[in-house]
């Protein structure tokens, strides 16, 4: 099954119900507020920007939160992709952090975002 790819500059653009099971590539930071929008939409994978990780690792808070809900999530390095631009996340982004669910899909730090999306679409996820 070829998972639909949703490119959204803001994770708030995901549609609960309509985007369930999609591969969501966003320009949003990986903070907890973003995590709640992803949880509502239930994508198979949510990709965020690590936003420089931030104080108390706030830029990665979505990863463990979504892990607890069975959703794969990862971030791309803020030095590799522009924050707020999903196309930059997809085409320029390099994975910086992953939750265990993402690791189980074969996603790992250092991987190009475009390559991981091709991998997941080719395997049927």
Image (spheres, rainbow, N blue to C red):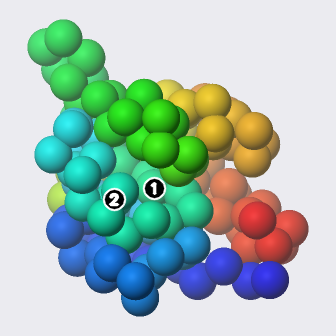
Label 1 Cα crowd, 10 Å radius (few <14 / some 14-19 / many 20+): many
The one of 67 and 53 positioned closer to us in this rendering:
67
- How far from the left and from the top, in percent, is residue 103? 69, 35
- Residue at the top extreme of this rendering: 56
Left or right: residue 20 versus residue 125 is left
Tell me the SS state at disc 2: helix
User: Residue at (58%, 83%) from the top-left corner?
Assistant: 4
Q: Which mark is residue 46?
A: 1
The one of 30 and 64 positioned closer to us in this rendering:
64
User: Residue at (44%, 53%) from the top-left corner?
Assistant: 47
- How far from the left and from the top, in percent, is residue 19? 44, 81
Left or right: residue 18 versus residue 115 is left
- How far from the left and from the top, in percent, is residue 44? 57, 62
| Image label count | 2
Tell me the SS state at disc 1: strand
Label 2 Cα crowd, 10 Å radius (few <14 / some 14-19 / many 20+): many
According to the picture, the residue beneath numbered tag 2 turns out to be 38
Where is 24 relative to 108, above or below? below
User: Residue at (45%, 65%) from the top-left corner?
Assistant: 42
Q: Quadrant of the N terminus?
A: bottom right
Mark 1 and mark 2 in contact (Cβ < 8 Å)? yes
Q: Quadrant of residue 56?
A: top left
User: Residue at (33%, 78%) from the top-left corner?
Assistant: 16
Mark closer to the chain start, 2 or 1: 2
Q: Is residue 78 visible?
A: no
Q: Quadrant of residue 79?
A: top left
Q: Is residue 100 visible?
A: yes
Left or right: residue 123 versus residue 93 is right
- How far from the left and from the top, in percent, is residue 101? 64, 39
How far apart are the alpha carbons under marks 2 and 1?
7 Å
Where is 38 relative to 99, above or below? below
């Amino acid at each position: 099954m070829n998972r639909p790819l949703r490119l959204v500059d803001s994770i708030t653009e995901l549609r609960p119900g309509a985007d369930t099971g999609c591969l969501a590539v966003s320009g949003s930071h990986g903070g907890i507020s973003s995590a709640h929008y992803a949880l509502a939409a239930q994508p198979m994978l949510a990709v965020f920007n690590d936003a420089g990780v931030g104080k108390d690792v706030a830029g990665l808070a979505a990863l463990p939160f979504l892990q607890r809900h069975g959703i794969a999530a990862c971030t791309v390095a803020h030095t590799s992709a522009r924050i707020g631009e999903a196309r930059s996340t997809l085409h320029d982004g390099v994975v910086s952090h992953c939750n265990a669910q993402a690791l189980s899909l074969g996603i790992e730090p250092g991987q190009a975002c475009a390559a991981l999306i091709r991998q997941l679409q080719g395997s049927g996820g």
